[in-house]
Amino acid sequence: MENINIEEIMAQIKREIKEKGLTPDMLSFEDVPYSKPVQVTREGGSSLADADDALAHMNAHYYVQPYKPIAGNPLKVFIKKVIRKLTKFYVEPVVFEQNEFNANTVSVLNTFRGAIEGQASKEDSGLADRIEALELAQKALLTRLDGLERENAALRSALEEQEES
């Protein structure tokens, strides 16, 4: 059985804390800076910003490496390399097909996102035109209302003069 050197482990932990810039005033895990992984759920995100984050992640990580680096005990590395050579005919085509599917899926999603943005800008443009037309109609109605009020006031004063005489 190996002896565990607690002092050495603690020194290593303290070095890592110092390298990461962590301080004692960081009281909880929420206060410690880290990059938050993209959350994926079957229900989907609640906003387009969530979709943008997921799409950015997909754009950056759609390619899957067929093999991970091998390290460690030389005998284990040799055995793993032999197994890798023996399974290469099966693993590589599957990974390449998956990469092709991922690339096409990301491409389609990027196209959908562009179409959504284009449709939104068309709707915004149409709404702006509609608002402008309504504002012009409102201005014309206010001008007409003002004219009618002046005409009404003139008629009332003429009626009052007629009743007085």
Image (cartoon, helix red, strand yellow):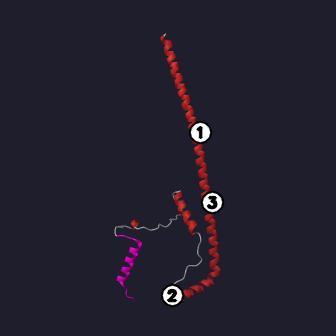
Most frequent secondary structure within the magenta stretch: helix
Which picture quadrant has residue 48?
bottom right
Q: Which residue is mark 3?
A: 111
Mark 3 vs 1, N-terminal side? 3
From mark 2 to mark 3, how far is it between C-alphas?
A: 47 Å
Q: Amino acid at mark 1?
A: Ala
Query: What is the secondary structure assignment of the residue under circle 1?
Result: helix
Q: Tag 2: Cα neighbours inside 10 Å, few (<14), some, or many (≥20)?
A: few
Residue 19: x and y in percent read 41, 74
Tell me how far mark 3 sits from mark 1, CA to CA: 33 Å
Say what amino acid the circle numbered 3 marks: Thr
Cα distance between the residues tagged 1 and 2: 77 Å
Q: Is residue 34 left or right of residue 66?
A: left
- Furthest-top residue in view? 165
Q: Residues in magenta?
A: 1-23
Which is more toward the observer, 92 or 14?
Answer: 14
What percent of the width, then of the height, locates residue 6? 35, 82
Residue type pointed to by label 2:
Asn
